[in-house]
Amino acid sequence: CNNTRDNGRIGIVELIISKNEETIKGCNFHSDVIEFFSNNMKPDANECKIDAYPNDIIGFNCQKNQHMISYKQSLDIDADLDADLENVAVIPNDCFDSISIGSNKKYIVNELPGAQTYRSKLRSMPRYFKVPYHNNELDVTFHCECTVGSKTNKIIITVKALNGQISKKYEKSEIKSSPSIVDGPVYVCPHKQAIEPKLIKWNIKDTETIDSCKIDVNRFYSYAQLTCPNNNFSMHSNIQLTYNILKPNKIDEYKIFNESELNKLIPHSEILVDVVESNNDINVDTYNLYLFFPYYIKENYEINVVCDNTNTKYENKQGGKYIYNIKIPKRGKKVKGCNFNSNKKSEMFENGEIIKLDENTNTCKIDVKPKDVIAFECPP
């Protein structure tokens, strides 16, 4: 938005469009396949039935693929190359703004208050509408038709009654796993928005798909990034961070995951947050956690860390869940150093003896060589 002519400023709006691979519930009666429609009808089919629930998006198409048409228009190719563009009759002609219930024409907003409809201003089809949340005691069934030449195709939509029921719960889970990406010293996972609240699905299958990420922390001086906001803030107060152990000794039970638990499992591990300085301010990244593992690790470890936001519900939305499967390989080489922690012996030092502090003993001397790793531990 350029307002510099009136001594104003240039305003820039950044629009981020997230990837969405979800299929639209829809009926496509044209021979050109629409990949994001659930039903691409066979040439001899003339009827398609859809069961619809709140937040479903329903689509209806009888014309040639819209992307192909847009491309031809940009090349200024004659429209008569696709005769069906002009020869498709839609009944009602303003479907889905109007719908047919039996032989009567009705406005969809009267039958389903809050329904949203959409179609391109440049093309007659596809047509879409979004099912609103409702509490109807009876199913609402309606249809639209399209006539191409002598053939009439019909989409029959039944918006299912809810009768005050809550959304269906999953009976089992299916893990959809992706590898992490190495970004400098950080192992980063995709699908970071998986935990954010999304519109609740009412017609889900028995199987829940949970995004997961595999992280192999096979390099020292690297960090595993976990996208899981701090639950000290009200907007994320329902988030739970838990873990279980797969190796070296399997423990299926999930427990609260924090630095104390991680340190019990792998001594000297840390959970860190990123701090950014800008304009003399110090900003803490409360959205991500970074796991750091020490130079010496006694055994091979594997843990699942779960960021669970499913208890967050608002505006008919519900948060999601993300699983981090983290493998930490054994690192057998110990470090040279001094342990002043009188509470416990540390296995990471070549000389694991505890140096007891008194008036005469407060110094530790180490002989080092190039590439030696030096460490010291102080009392907590």
Image (tube, grey):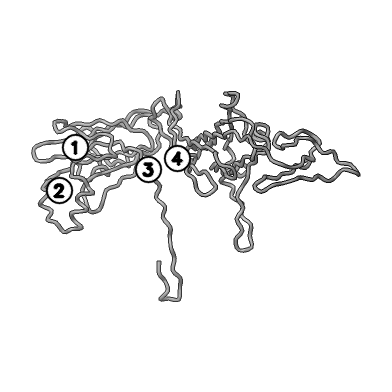
Callout 3 amino acid: Asn
The earlier-in-sequence mark between 2 and 4 is 2
The answer for how far apart the CA atoms under marks 1 and 3 are is: 24 Å
Locate residue 268, reporting x and y percent. Answer: 68, 38
Task: Using the image as rendered, state which of residue 162 and residue 295 is in the foreground.
Answer: 295
The answer for how far apart the CA atoms under marks 2 and 3 are is: 28 Å
Residue under circle 1?
29
Residue under circle 4?
198
Q: Quadrant of the N terminus?
A: bottom left
The answer for how far apart the CA atoms under marks 2 and 4 are is: 36 Å
The earlier-in-sequence mark between 1 and 2 is 1
The answer for how far apart the CA atoms under marks 1 and 2 are is: 13 Å
Callout 1 amino acid: Phe
Residue under circle 3?
20
The earlier-in-sequence mark between 2 and 3 is 3
Callout 2 amino acid: Leu
Q: Quadrant of the C terminus?
A: top right
Residue under circle 2?
85
* Residue 343, image quadrant: top right
The earlier-in-sequence mark between 1 and 4 is 1
